[in-house]
Amino acid sequence: MAAAPLRFEPFTPAHLPAVLLLESQAYPEPWTQGMYRHELETPCSHLHVGLLGEDLVAYAGFWLVLDEAHITRVTVAEEHRRRGYGRQMVEHLLRQAFKLGAALARLEVRDGNTAAIHLYERMGFVPEGRRPGYYQRTGEDALLMIKRF
């Protein structure tokens, strides 16, 4: 099923309740309200939400450090997955990062998250390393991936 285009907005405190709900459903080690509040106050952090009408269906973010964008989160509500919204969110992040001067993007992804790995590979990310046991709760490795602009 083809995805309708998302409308993107910068993440604000008003989005926090919806983001925290999605976060708790999507991750074995979810970020907390305090972590998101810190992200909102950190100048290098760039968080965005993806909306269908008024419904928040996705969110994503990156840290910009010098010329590198480190993608920190890409999350799509379960009932909206496999429709291209993750790709739309990553494309939006990459456009924003490039406009801000990024020359490359990096991310880490759970080794068991094959859907995300395949998405990133289709978008031009390539593996550059692994962090064994990186995810403490599950013990999964993190696959490190990079894309140069």
Image (tube, rainbow, N blue to C red):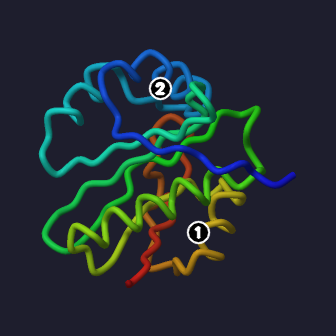
Tag of residue 19: 2
Residue 69 in percent (x, y) is at 29, 65
Label 1, on which residue?
120
Tag of residue 110: none
Residue 52 lies in what quarter of the image? top right
Q: Residue at x 56, y 36 (%)?
A: 51
Q: Residue furthest top?
A: 17
Q: Residue at x 34, y 40 (%)?
A: 10
Q: Nearer the viewer, mark 2 or mark 1?
A: 2
Residue type at mark 2? Val
| Viewer-side residue, 50 vs 114 | 50
Check the image and report above or below for 12 versus 144: above
Looking at the rendered image, the quarter that the C terminus falls into is bottom left
Check the image and report above or below for 50 versus 22: below
Q: How many marks?
A: 2
Q: Residue at x 57, y 25 (%)?
A: 54
Query: Mark 2, residues whose alpha carbon is within 10 Å: few (<14), some, or many (≥20)?
Result: many
Q: Is there CB contact under 8 Å for labels 2 and 1?
A: no
| Viewer-side residue, 124 vs 89 | 89
